[in-house]
Image (cartoon, rainbow, N blue to C red):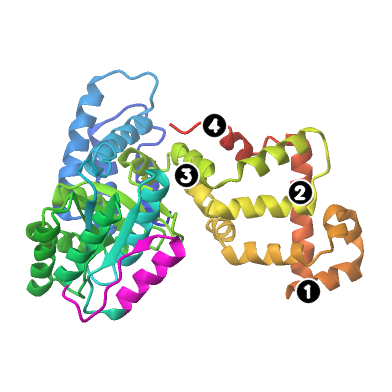
Amino acid sequence: MALFQQLNTQLSQAFKHITGQSRLTEKNIQDTLQEIRIALLDADVALSVCDNFLNDVRKQCTQERIKVVDQLSPRETLIKIIHDEMTALLGSSHTDINLKVRAPAVILLAGLQGCGKTTSTIKLAHFLQNQYKKSVMVTSTDVHRPAAIEQLALLAEQAQITCHPSDSHQKPTHIAKTALQQAKINLIDVLIIDTAGRLHVDRAMMKEIQELHKLTQPIEVLFVVDSMTGQDAVNTAQAFHKALPLTGIVLTKVDGDARGGAALSMRAITGKPIKFMGTGEKFDDFERFHPERIASRVLDRGDIVSLVETVHKKVDQQKAEKFAKKMKKGKSFTFEDFLEQLQQLRQLGGMRTIIDKLPGLNQLPPQLMEQLGDEDKFKSIEAIILSMTKKERRYPALLLNASRKKRIARGSGTQLQAVTQVISQFNKVQKMMKKLKGNQIMQMLSRMSPH
């Protein structure tokens, strides 16, 4: 997760002030908190939120100095305090979406133009269909941008979501009214309305959304915000909060190059919970927002629970079990197995997703991190393996032949050196598989039960 990456790095540097210290003192606490303050402000956390947060941390540190905690070092104690306070800042626990109303439950999505409302509408619909087993209908009232209406219809078709048609000649209230009627007639559980956006907050937009709110009486009003917009996102949230009874927040583009300040400030400024976050471009790249897990990621303590949930959701369990049995029987690890494991890894969102959720791995060298998160490298390796004959994939020893490697390079559109590198990487994995006998990390994770 690119969100918080900069903050994660700066906080790691700040904790060096207290690493190796035998106890918490006024000086090492002050020095560390001063660096943390700089890190938070650099991450675009609102000044008032930053100061209140650090005051709470300072109070807890003062109390901890009195206690004798044999199990934790001063560094671990401070990290635990910051983790607990950050969890509280983000909302303590996950706040679920409210569907406790007579069907159809109406959900209104609001936000500025370009924040990701339309994509979030489809992702939320997909999420409710798959996780809650609800029938969902979507519609767009953005009559000011015909392209937005077309985009929603296209995405809905791709995601197999029912879409109530609309066009730019209709009034937003008319679209919402007819969509609500159709949802009732077709016994739809949830109706999600994608509202119009603007490049900035204006009265006309707010009045339009307020009219839609009065007409549809939504059970949820979710403010969609681009996590990459920093402090501006907080200001926009305040404006929407004054105009609408917001019930929650959806953070989008958390996989982008963001500093994370908006996410840390949003709950404190609006008093409303962050309920979901968009983590990628695919329809199922949409997660519940768990404050404790996010705080753990910020402090590089990992997020094993979310990783396990991702594995259970995206890994083909039958293929995984078949592969494990094969390895346990001592059968050879082939290029076909290698390709299958790479494809499973891509299903999880790539190595970058796993690294983000495992504690300590964010401290790997930047060059290595870049390689592991490079989607193009995955595609290149896949192309090289697919350019091999079935016999070559099953009997890798055949690839000692130079002419075979040249043919594979031509077929995959790569250089001979790239083919040689893939074969070398494969040989290393093959040796590792012989030692592990099928107990690789994905297998261990897939056998764990998410909580």
Three-letter code for the amino acid on which mark 4 is drawn: Met
Q: Earlier in the sequence, mark 3 or mark 1?
A: 3
Q: Residue at x 33, y 38 (%)?
A: 292
Q: Position of residue 348 (x, y in %)?
A: 54, 50
Structural crowding at the residue carrying mark 1, measured as other residues with C-alpha within 10 Å and reported as few (<14), some (14–19) or many (≥20): some
Q: Which of marks 3 and 2 is nearer the N terminus?
A: 3
Q: Residue 448 carries which label?
A: 4
Label 1 to label 4, Cα distance in Å? 40 Å
Q: What stretch is highlighted in magenta?
A: 147-171
Q: Residue 357 carries which label?
A: 3
Q: Where is residue 12 in the image (x, y as percent from the top left)?
A: 39, 46
Structural crowding at the residue carrying mark 4, measured as other residues with C-alpha within 10 Å and reported as few (<14), some (14–19) or many (≥20): few
Contact (Cβ within 8 Å) of mark 1 with mark 4: no
Residue 262 falls left or right of residue 280:
left
Which residue position is annotated with label 2?
A: 428
Structural crowding at the residue carrying mark 2, measured as other residues with C-alpha within 10 Å and reported as few (<14), some (14–19) or many (≥20): few
How many marks on residues?
4
Q: Which of marks 4 and 3 is in front?
A: 4
